[in-house]
Image (cartoon, rainbow, N blue to C red):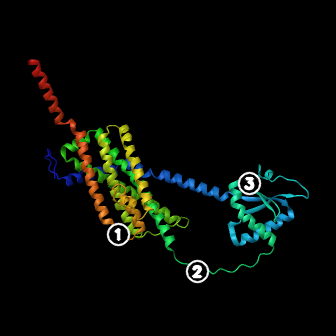
């Protein structure tokens, strides 16, 4: 199929292949592509360093403790009861330490023990086991009211009665745990797909604006159909993005294998990990082509980098709202909002990938992918028509119009 006015010898698909190969090779073997691969490593490195520092701070920080301000004999009763209960209940029983043993007849204000102490004292327990008083911030003492009452009751009771032994019978999983785990996996897959799409789709826009400023795009459009130019650029950038994702994936995979013992594990998705990865690649391609076609249409309206940033910002904000729509629809299975997210072209890749993590059925993905491809073709045709209308006005039509205006002015002068 050829556009009217084009006498090129290449079909639309052949011309698109030529453009895709030209852009793919030019970008892949450029120095900028090397720095493009290194770009995401810097925030990842900063995140790893920040996480390790935070973990070290959390490890070195002491757990909040309750300071005891009471007679030494009473404090020994409380501490002994606390040790007995902590041996069976673990961290549910707060830590306690004696900060100020009261002498007989001494009047000491518990609030004083909270001021300027180097120890990690979050509240003060005073009084006796029969009449305990907890002093401290409201949120903290409200949460400690029950454990402190239990310790005080144990201190009054004396020796702890034997507890019955509970027999444990484990299962591999439960429906609630499995559903929650798959929901977490679906959310992670959605977020990763969105981040990759938004990070990589902008390359299409920058490449188009650069060639538009150099008049290269007009030369290409004069030789081959505009749909071929748009389609070729889209698939070239998609190929470059897939190379980048493969490189980052290999790096992340090596890191995960090296630190698998300390990393959390995700629940296996309903379709299995291999199929989820395949569907993730497919839906990334469709989401990238859809958003890239919109960016190409935006590029036809912009002439400078500043205009690109101004026009692409609404597209980015709308895409963020689309991601929120797909995330919300994931938690509402079987509702109208989920069906809308599955049908709407820009949210369908995210919603369908989340569905794959929770539903083992593969047949619904076939019409979804076909619908995505149809939308890509439609948006490419609309974008190329818009580009042809706004940019390709500077050709013979303008010259002809200028000549006709000059002819009319000369004719009027003769009259």
Give residue 151's position: percent from left, percent from top. Answer: 76, 67
Q: Using residue 59 as the reference point, say whether residue 48 is left or right of it.
A: left
Tell me the CA gap for discs 1 and 2.
35 Å
**Do labels 3 and 1 touch, CB within 8 Å?**
no
**Mark found first going from the N terminus, 3 or 2:** 3
- Report which residue position mark 3 lands on: 136
Residue drawn at x 25%, y 43% is: 387
- Report which residue position mark 1 lands on: 362
Residue drawn at x 43%, y 54% is: 324
Foreground residue among 344 and 373: 344
Q: Using residue 201 as the reference point, say whether residue 49 is left or right of it.
A: right
Residue density around tag 2, few if under 14, some if 14–19, many if 20 or more, within 10 Å: few
**Mark found first going from the N terminus, 1 or 2:** 2
Q: In which quarter of the image is residue 166?
A: bottom right
Count of numbered marks: 3
Give residue 299's position: percent from left, percent from top. Answer: 31, 43
Q: Using residue 234 as the reference point, say whether residue 253 is left or right of it.
A: right
Give residue 142's position: percent from left, percent from top. Answer: 70, 58
- Report which residue position mark 2 lands on: 169
Up the image or down, 76 lies above or below 5; here it is below
Numbered tag placed on residue 273 in the rendering: none
> Is residue 266 visible to us here?
no
Foreground residue among 405 and 153: 153
Tell me the CA gap for discs 3 and 1.
57 Å
> Is residue 297 visible to us here?
yes
Q: In which quarter of the image is residue 412?
A: top left
Tell me the CA gap for discs 3 and 2.
41 Å
Q: What element carries label 1?
A: loop
Give residue 20's position: percent from left, percent from top. Answer: 27, 52
Residue drawn at x 13%, y 22% is: 409
Residue drawn at x 37%, y 46% is: 315
Q: Is mark 2 on a helix, strand or loop?
A: loop
């Amino acid at each position: 199929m050829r556009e009217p006015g084009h006498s090129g010898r290449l079909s639309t698909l052949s011309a698109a292949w030529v453009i895709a190969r030209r852009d793919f090779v030019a970008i892949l073997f450029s120095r900028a592509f090397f720095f493009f691969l290194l770009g995401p490593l810097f925030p990842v490195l900063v995140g790893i360093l920040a996480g390790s520092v935070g973990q070290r701070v959390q490890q070195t920080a002491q757990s909040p403790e309750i300071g005891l301000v009471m007679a030494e004999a009473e404090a020994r009763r409380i501490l002994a009861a606390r040790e007995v209960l902590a041996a069976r209940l673990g961290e549910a029983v707060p830590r306690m330490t004696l900060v100020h043993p009261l002498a007989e007849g001494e009047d000491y204000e518990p609030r004083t023990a909270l001021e300027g102490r180097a120890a990690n004292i979050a509240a003060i327990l005073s009084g006796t086991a029969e009449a305990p008083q907890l002093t401290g911030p409201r949120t903290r003492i409200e949460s400690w009211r029950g454990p402190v009452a239990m310790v005080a009751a144990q201190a009054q009771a004396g020796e702890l009665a034997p507890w019955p032994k509970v027999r444990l019978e484990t299962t591999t999983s439960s429906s609630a745990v499995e559903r929650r785990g798959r929901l977490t996996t679906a959310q992670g897959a959605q977020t990763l797909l969105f981040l990759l799409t938004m990070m990589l789709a902008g390359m299409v826009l920058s490449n188009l604006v650069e060639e538009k400023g150099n008049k290269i795009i007009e030369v290409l459009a004069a030789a081959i159909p505009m749909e071929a130019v748009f389609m070729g650029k889209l698939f070239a950038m998609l190929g470059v993005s897939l190379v980048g994702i493969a490189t980052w994936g290999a790096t992340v995979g090596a890191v995960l294998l090296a630190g698998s013992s300390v990393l959390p594990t995700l629940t296996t998705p309903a379709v299995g990990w291999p199929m989820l990865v395949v569907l993730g690649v497919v839906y990334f391609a469709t989401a990238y082509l859809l958003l890239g076609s919109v960016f190409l249409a935006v590029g036809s309206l912009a002439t400078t980098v500043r205009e690109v940033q101004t026009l692409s910002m609404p597209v980015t904000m709308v895409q963020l709202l689309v991601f929120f729509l797909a995330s919300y629809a994931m938690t509402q299975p079987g509702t109208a909002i989920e069906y809308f997210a599955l049908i709407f072209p820009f949210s369908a890749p995210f919603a369908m990938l989340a569905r794959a993590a929770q539903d083992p059925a593969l047949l619904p993905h076939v019409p979804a992918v076909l619908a995505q491809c149809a939308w890509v073709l439609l948006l490419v045709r609309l974008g190329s028509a818009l580009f042809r209308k706004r940019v390709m006005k500077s050709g013979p039509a303008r010259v002809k119009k200028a000549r006709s205006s000059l002819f009319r002015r000369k004719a009027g002068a003769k009259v």
